[in-house]
Amino acid sequence: MPAIVAGGGRDPRPALATHANAVLGDPRILRLLAVEGRSPALAERQAGFAPRAVDLWFGLTTREGEVVDPVLRLRAYAFAGAIAEVGLASIRGELELTPEEIIDELVDLFHRIAGTAADD
């Protein structure tokens, strides 16, 4: 959570770097989150990840009572799912990118999905 707050909902790099370094540094963590988390015993808890991430993002970027564009909400859910798939592809050896390159691409994707300009 501190990494998400550090980015203020507008800069995804702190949160993405924290997540990517944790899961790519130890493939067992990603397997637990993305594969084992789909088992019946953990599925309910895992299913709550995307809604919590989306709610946290909009909680940081919208004013109280402000209605979030449904298309932007759809994009936020798509991004949350994409992060898991990218991690799985990486540990399977399907991506020939360093963790830093993956983070850079996810940051770029975040800004494209959110319709915001990345600060370079």
Image: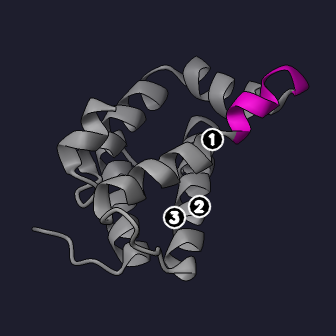
How much space separates mark 1 and mark 2, taking CA atoms?
A: 17 Å
Quadrant containing the N terminus in the rendered view: top left
Q: Which residues are magenta?
A: 40-47
Taking the spot 54% from the left edge, 44% from the top edge, the residue there is 52
Majority secondary structure in the magenta region: helix
Quadrant containing the C terminus in the rendered view: bottom left
**Viewer can see residue 94:** no
Quadrant in the rendering for residue 34: top right
Is 27 situated above or below 116?
Answer: above
Residue carrying label 3: 76
The amino acid at mark 3 is Ala
Tell which circle, 1 or 2, labels the residue nearer the N-terminal end: 2
Is 70 situated above or below 91?
Answer: below
Quadrant in the rendering for residue 18: top left
Return the residue found at the far right: 40
Residue carrying label 1: 88
The amino acid at mark 1 is Leu
Q: Are marks 2 and 3 in contact (CB under 8 Å)?
A: yes
How much space separates mark 3 and mark 1, taking CA atoms?
A: 19 Å
SS at badge 2: helix
Taking the spot 59% from the left edge, 61% from the top edge, the residue there is 77
Is 31 situated above or below 81?
Answer: above
Q: Decide: few, some or many residues near mark 1? Use Cα within 10 Å; few <14, some 14-19, many ≥20.
A: many
**Viewer can see residue 60:** yes
